[in-house]
Image (cartoon, rainbow, N blue to C red):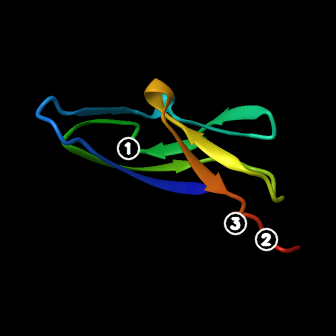
Amino acid sequence: MRILLELTVTDASGLAFRAADYSLSGLGARSAALWVDPAEQSGASVQATLVFEIPNQVIALVLDGPHGASLSLGTGHHTNS
């Protein structure tokens, strides 16, 4: 699964992105990204691609981020085979 992540900060302190702060959870397990571009970046806006290996079945996945942030990814990632 490829996740395109775009983060933008709204205050003057800036934004620090560390790929290691993000993981994918589902089926009672948590996995780190297999590949990330860029791995780290700082500034007002960050665009990153995170690639995860997941099973090809209907499961509810969550992208877990720093400070308890999370994003539900739903079950639309699977195929009908």
Q: Amino acid at mark 3?
A: Gly
Q: Secondary structure at mark 1?
A: loop
Front-most of residues 39 and 43: 43
Numbered label attached to residue 76 = 3
Q: Amino acid at mark 1?
A: Pro
Is disc 3 in contact with disc 2, using a CB cutoff of under 8 Å? no
Quadrant occupied by the C terminus: bottom right
At 79% from the left and 53% from the top, the residue drawn is: 59
**How far apart are the two marked residues, 1 and 2, measured between alpha carbons?**
28 Å
Nearer-N-terminus badge (1/2)? 1
Q: Secondary structure at mark 3?
A: loop
Q: Secondary structure at mark 2?
A: loop
Q: Please rate how many residues cluster around mark 1, counting C-alpha atoms within 10 Å: few if below 14, some from 14 to 19, many from 20.
A: some
Residue 73: percent from the left, percent from the top?
A: 61, 54
At 80% from the left and 52% from the top, the residue drawn is: 55
Residue 45: percent from the left, percent from the top?
A: 24, 47
At 66% from the left and 57% from the top, the residue drawn is: 74
Nearer-N-terminus badge (3/1)? 1
Query: Which residue is most to the right?
Result: 81
The image shows residue 48, relative to residue 40, as above or below, that is below
Residue 56: percent from the left, percent from the top?
A: 81, 59
State which mark lies toward you, 3 or 2: 3
Q: Is 50 on the left-hand or right-hand side of 45?
A: right
The residue pinned by badge 1 equals 38
> Can you tell which quarter of the image residue 42 is in?
top left
Picture mark count: 3
